[in-house]
Amino acid sequence: MTTTTTMTTDTMTTNVIAPQQQSCSTLHLPSEPKLADQHVHCALAIGDLTLDVSSDLPWSFSLQSRGSVIQRFREPTEEVGGTGVAPLLQDIDDSGTPVLLVVTGRGGTGGEPMAVWRMTASRDRFVRAGEMFGFRQFYRTTEGFFGNYAHSSAASGSVTLYRWADDKLVTVAVLDTQAAAAPGDESRAWVRTGDVLCALSEDDDPPGARAQRTAALQAAGVNPATAQQQLCTQSWVASIYRGGR
């Protein structure tokens, strides 16, 4: 599932930092009233930088360093996600550097749509890296890919795996998964790891998506013909449905 949004960004160097605000991580946002009327003001810390967050024009951000605002940008949305989280920082690729995740829609039982903003190597600017859908439980593969899970039913779903390319998210594979005890497509060539069945997705929606994933695997040095066995047998796959997911 893809959520399309528009965004704006601007770089500033002279504005004074606002007084210290509540941490965004402590907030739980109700679904009503609409986000613009909730007047959320909070902050996130990134090393010696501060990211000021406001829902007055949801969502608006200002990145601040040493008394000045060095960047302003927006991720427009009108809805609060089902989990009620404010924008958050999370290390999704096990690199030690978090990205900014902004929930952009209500979502549902399958997960939530999120915009991903990545800090550049110069650490003075966020760039919009792309979008993802699902839960905020992230997995890392031995090849350095990373991704998250989304439900398609109570006991099945998919993990979309990504890599970075010029600060953009590139989808390299989608793994269809299901709990081994659940009824499913017995004609499919599943790989079983623990109590999880796993297979490389053949979905081609939108048209051309499968070819793009195949090309991305090849660019990352993974043979598409053996990718299912290589990815589905990793130990993290066995953990997907633990804890009642």
Image: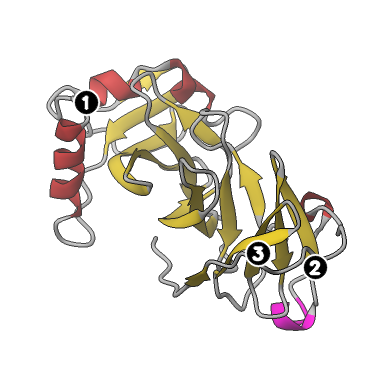
Q: Which residue is label 3 attached to?
A: 62
Q: Is residue 8 above or below residue 141?
A: below
Mark 1: which amino acid? Ala
Measure how far apart labels 1 and 3 are at the Cα level: 41 Å
Picture residue at 59% right of the left edge, 61% below the top: 103
Q: Secondary structure at mark 3?
A: strand
139 to the left or right of 28: left
Given residues 14 and 162, the one toward you in this image is: 14
Given residues 164 and 234, the one toward you in this image is: 164
Q: Evaluate if marks 2 and 3 touch, with contact meaning CB atoms under 8 Å apart.
A: no
Q: Residues within 10 Å of mark 2 (few under 14, many from 20)?
A: some
Which residues make up the magenta segment?
32-37
Picture residue at 54% right of the left edge, 69% below the top: 75
Measure how far apart labels 2 and 1 are at the Cα level: 45 Å
Q: Residues within 10 Å of mark 3 (few under 14, many from 20)?
A: many
Mark 2: which amino acid? His
Name the image quarter holding the C terminus.
Answer: top right
Chain-order first, disc 2 or disc 3: 2
Q: Is residue 80 visible?
A: yes
Mark 3: which amino acid? Ser
Measure how far apart labels 2 and 3 are at the Cα level: 12 Å
Q: Secondary structure at mark 1?
A: helix
Q: Secondary structure at mark 2?
A: strand
Q: Which residue is label 2 attached to?
A: 41
Residue 141 x, y percent position in the rendering: 40, 24
Q: Which label belongs to residue 155?
A: none
Whether the magenta-drawn stretch holds residue 35 is answered as yes
Name the image quarter holding the N terminus.
Answer: bottom left
Picture residue at 31% right of the left edge, 24% below the top: 231
Q: Which residue is label 1 attached to?
A: 227
Chain-order first, disc 2 or disc 1: 2
